[in-house]
Amino acid sequence: MTATDATPWSPASIPTHLLNDVEVMAEGLSFPEGPVAMADGSVLITEIDNAKFTRVTADGKVELIAQCEGGPNGAAIGPDGAAYLCNNGGRFASGNWKGGWIERVDLDNGTVDRLYTECDGRRLSGPNDIVFDANGDFWFTDTGKFKGREREVGSVFWATIDGSRIVEVAHPAETPNGVGLSPDDRTLYYAETVTGRLRRRTILGPAELEPLQGHGMESLVVGMPGQQPFDSLAVDAEGNVCIATFLTGCITSISADGSKVVQYTFPPDLEDPMPTNICFGGPDLRTAYITMAHTGRLLRCPWPTPGLKLHYNA
């Protein structure tokens, strides 16, 4: 549904397709997120609840890359071949949360370095997902935090990998979660968890988005019916935005203009109400890797369209 549509999507009007040949690549994971497909067939993932950054080999062996603090979430490979992680700082209910940060992980030795903990003197709250542009800079979402009766409202940021510059490019943002770029790098997408909405913003240049008009209705691509919270996302080669969708337990694929919405479901024995993320890999980028938080699994399956080739990999 686009912002100008008069008729909203209804659950019955959204076509669904059952994914075939779905394999369990690894299980026993602790709230897996942030999948990154590697050239050797392995997949890097974060495990939020035990603060690990993990490699799952092509044959399903689980190996520790780095023990992090807090709650490592979205991940991406940067232009220097290192992994860059959004760390949400851990669960607020744990009593140990003091804010989140962006960290760099050296894949050769597992060294973890914090790059950013604040912007303009304000502590980062819950950094969530990250994507690199062709310039080697990155955009990331900060979902914010719910703290009992209090709440820290989310934002979207842009930053450089050397730790020298971070800019808040969108605030307030309603629980921004998954983030991605269009194939031409001119549009930034982010998904809202609580509302189940996909937003798009035109990129004018480094650290600059086109200003919204009024209430910013032009940024709305799709708003889902009912309660279908959005988590993280990946963009395919055709420009469709593929979003892990809670409760319905599917991947929602949305065309760039919002005119086409399709939901991809899982076989009954692999259903999970909390798919958290998707990425694409394989020699033709037609293999999807999907993290499932409730069952602690990493799934692998063919995808109907090839994924968008990311600017950096390893």
Image (tube, helix red, strand yellow):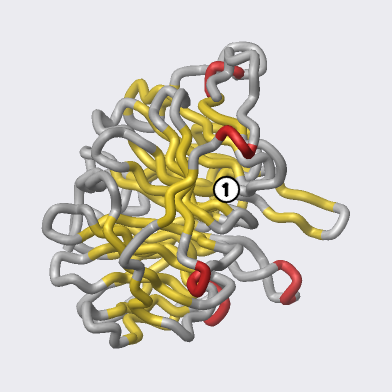
Q: Amino acid at mark 1?
A: Phe
In front here: 127 or 255? 255
Instruction: Tell me which residue sits at (53%, 21%) in the image.
Output: 2
Image: 177 above or below 195: below
Q: Residue at x 40, y 31 (%)?
A: 255
Q: In the rendered image, is residue 301 in sight?
A: yes
Quadrant including the C terminus: bottom left
**Residue at left offset 26%, top offset 63%:** 37
Horizontal placement of 35 versus 147: left or right?
Answer: left
Seen from the viewer's position, the closer of residues 169 and 277 is: 277
Q: Position of residue 42 (x, y in %)?
A: 23, 73
- Label 1 sits on a secondary structure element that is strand
Seen in the picture, residue 12 relative to 307 is either above or below; the reply is above
Across and down, in percent, residue 103 comes to: 41, 64
Q: Is residue 78 left or right of residue 117?
A: left
Q: Is residue 140 visible?
A: no
Horizontal side, residue 309 vs residue 3: left or right: left
Query: Residue 27, image x and y in percent?
Result: 43, 82
Query: Quadrant of residue 61 in the image?
Result: bottom left
Quadrant of the rendered structure where residue 111 is?
Answer: bottom left
Position in image of residue 257 (x %, y %): 42, 23
Q: Quadrant of the N terminus?
A: top right
Q: Residues within 10 Å of mark 1 (few under 14, many from 20)?
A: many
Residue found at x 61% / y 70%: 90
Q: How many marks?
A: 1
Q: Which residue was labeled with disc 1?
A: 230
